[in-house]
Image (spheres, rainbow, N blue to C red):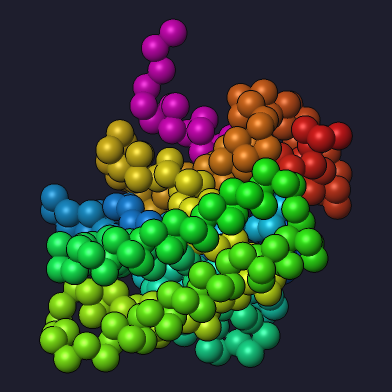
């Protein structure tokens, strides 16, 4: 059977609209997390003129129960972070983008944690500038990840995980900060040098980079949310753009459920078939039962 593109688009839109209440329930549960990880990635969506498309962004938010919701906006400013997270109280884990800093500063109830993987990237990009110093730094950061690997192997959690990090990761972090401060005193360093910028990146975020030491629920980096958003960059190479802004919004809804299915080792096809067959008769007050995290466990 050959169906027109318009018909297929219409069917897809109707199906995703049926799933929107499930997405909304999942989003509300994500916002109840004590620790959130957030990132952003660009997309083209909607016409901006002849032969041009508008710039837009997806902002995946990763909750502590391994659920992801892709929020969407036409702006990369801090206003979207404030609108989406609202009155969130807890720890926000992010990269060094200023929009997250602005939100955290406006909310005393929010503790900001930042990403060691992005810090490592800053030094890696400065390797040609100071190869010996950078290699020494990267080796120390590698030590942090060896500690995390040991924690996973021993299945540590809670206070045991915190104590292990304080015993093994904190000396590494303290040493890196002290080393960076010593490096900054070198008279030969130019302010515009990549290595200088990497040192400044680390030292200006040293408080945020140490949050994971005291809170066992905080990851040392945002790699988990970056893995979750991968379908969007991959999509930019496959389907290139969203023809309309409403289309981009629908992609965010369906991708939130599909990605969460994968995080819980649930077959997205089985899940969507199950949910679409029962959504019309499921009580709205119990819609949380149809989220991937809950449904496939039950």
Q: Residue at x 28, y 87 (%)?
A: 184
- In which image quadrant can residue 269 be found? top right
Q: In the rendered view of the protein, which quadrant contains the N terminus?
A: top left
Dominant SS type (magenta): helix
Residue 188 shows in the view: yes
Q: Residue at x 49, y 58 (%)?
A: 143
Q: Residue at x 52, y 55 (%)?
A: 145
Residue 61: horizontal and vertical position, in percent?
56, 59
- Is residue 119 found left or right of 287 in the rendered image? left
Q: Which residues are magenta?
A: 1-17
Q: In the rendered view of the protein, which quadrant contains the C terminus?
A: top right
- Is residue 175 found left or right of 91 in the rendered image? left
- Residue 8 forms part of the magenta stretch: yes
Residue 169: horizontal and vertical position, in percent?
58, 66
Q: Nearer the viewer, residue 67 or 6?
A: 67
Q: Nearer the viewer, residue 93 or 29?
A: 93
- Residue 106 forms part of the magenta stretch: no
| Mark count | 0
Residue 56: horizontal and vertical position, in percent?
34, 60
Residue 279: horizontal and vertical position, in percent?
75, 36
Q: Residue at x 35, y 49 (%)?
A: 244
| Vertical placement of residue 249 versus 10, above or below | below
Q: Which residue reaches farthest top? A: 1
| Vertical placement of residue 237 versus 127, above or below | above
- Is residue 118 found left or right of 211 in the rendered image? left
- Is residue 133 found left or right of 159 in the rendered image? left
Q: Nearer the viewer, residue 116 or 37?
A: 116
């Amino acid at each position: 059977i050959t169906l027109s593109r318009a018909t297929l688009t219409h069917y897809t839109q109707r199906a995703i609209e049926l799933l929107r209440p499930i997405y909304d329930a999942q989003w509300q549960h994500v916002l109840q997390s004590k620790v959130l990880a957030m990132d952003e990635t660009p997309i083209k969506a909607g016409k901006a003129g002849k032969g041009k498309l508008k710039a837009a962004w997806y902002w995946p938010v990763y909750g502590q129960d391994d659920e992801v919701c892709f929020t969407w906006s036409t702006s990369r400013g801090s206003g979207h972070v404030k609108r989406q997270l609202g009155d969130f109280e807890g720890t926000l884990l992010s990269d060094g983008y200023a929009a997250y800093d602005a939100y955290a500063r406006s909310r005393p109830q929010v503790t900001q944690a930042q990403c060691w993987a992005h810090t490592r990237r800053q030094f890696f990009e400065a390797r040609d500038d100071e190869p010996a110093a950078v290699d020494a730094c990267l080796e120390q950061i590698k030590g942090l990840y060896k500690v995390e690997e040991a924690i996973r192997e021993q299945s540590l959690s809670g206070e045991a995980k915190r104590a292990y990090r304080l015993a093994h990761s904190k000396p590494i972090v303290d040493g890196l900060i002290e080393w960076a401060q010593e490096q900054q005193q070198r008279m030969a360093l130019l302010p515009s040098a990549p290595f200088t910028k990497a040192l400044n990146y680390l030292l200006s975020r040293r408080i945020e980079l140490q949050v994971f030491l005291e809170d066992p629920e905080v990851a040392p980096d945002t790699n988990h949310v970056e893995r979750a958003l991968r379908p969007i960059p991959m999509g930019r190479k496959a389907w290139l753009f969203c023809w309309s802004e409403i289309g981009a919004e629908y992609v965010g809804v369906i991708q939130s459920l599909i990605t969460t299915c994968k995080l819980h080792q649930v077959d997205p096809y089985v899940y969507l078939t199950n949910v679409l067959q029962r959504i019309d008769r499921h009580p709205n007050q119990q819609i949380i039962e149809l989220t991937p995290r809950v449904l496939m466990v039950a």
